[in-house]
Amino acid sequence: MRIDIIFDTICPWCYIGKRRLEEMLDRRPNLNAEIFWHAFLLNPDMPPEGIDFEDYMHKKFGGELRSQRLYSAIDQAGKSVGIEFDFNQVKRTPNTVDSHRLVRFAARENRASEMVETLYQNYFMTGRDIGNRSVLIEIGASIGFDDQSLRDYLYSDEDIADILEQNPRSHRLGISGVPAFIFEREFSISGAQDPNVLERMLNVAEEKQREFFESGVQSV
């Protein structure tokens, strides 16, 4: 079962959605799920150095009161899937191009999901600036990647153009928000959905898959 996830590395709902998907997959231990991560830049015009986090939140959501309400909703949803958000630690909203490149780097060794989890923990729980290449090298090295290989990659231009092209590709698929989950390249749903909802989508994809193989057998 192929599952494509469209996400951003600074999206708390994407982190919640990841954990909810994992909760659903835990119910299906015999399912052979292949997960592919695709970049979506919530702030495609973000300067390379990022901006102050509180300023960003107030401008985006209309003041401190609304920001606090959002934090509360995210915090509650996070706790339900074992995430302890600590927005007090977050000082900057980063440009996320390089953090998405780090996920690409990890995907070469089939460790993209592990890297996504590590990035989320470093950003949302300890407030590290995941737009800083030196920080990203440290994050990658902390889970066993070679720091010189990380440095060579992140200080090159490799994959930058493709990351920047991901938003238009998602828009062409009718996806304008994240997280988004696509099952078997055909059945998609957006939002940090409840595991039961995700399982229903999975069931639809499995049924379609069975129909396809059964029709193929009958036509032989």
Image (cartoon, rainbow, N blue to C red):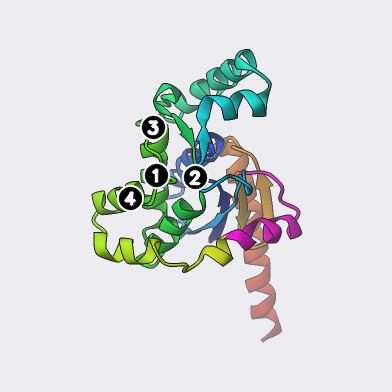
The mark found on residue 127 in the picture is 3
Does the residue at mark 2 contact the one at mark 1 (Cβ under 8 Å)? yes
Whole-number angstrom distance, CA of label 4 to CA of label 2: 17 Å
Q: How crowded is mark 2: few (under 14 residues within 10 Å), some or many (20 or more)?
A: many
Q: What is the distance, in whole Å, between disc 2 and disc 3 at their CAs?
A: 13 Å
Main secondary structure type of the part rendered in magenta = helix
Instruction: Residue type at mark 2: give it.
Output: Thr
Residue 146 appearing in the image: no
Q: Which mark is residue 119?
A: 1
Q: Earlier in the sequence, mark 4 or mark 1?
A: 1
The amino acid pointed to by label 4 is: Ser
> x%, y% of residue 55?
57, 26
Which of the marked residues, 2 or 3, is nearer the chain's N terminus?
2
Query: How many residues crowd around disc 3 within 10 Å: few (fewer than 14), some, or many (20 or more)?
Result: some
The percent position of residue 99, horizontal first and vertical second, equals 45, 51
Residue that numbered label 2 is attached to: 9
Amino acid type of the residue that numbered disc 3 sits on in the rendered structure: Gly
Q: What stretch is highlighted in magenta?
A: 164-178
Q: Do the residues labelled 2 and 3 touch (CB within 8 Å)?
A: no
Q: Position of residue 149 (x, y in %)?
A: 29, 66
Residue at (33%, 66%) from the top-left corner? 152
- The disc at residue 136 is none
Residue at the location (62% across, 39% down)? Answer: 197
Q: Is the residue under label 3 in contact with that under label 1 (CB below 8 Å)?
A: no
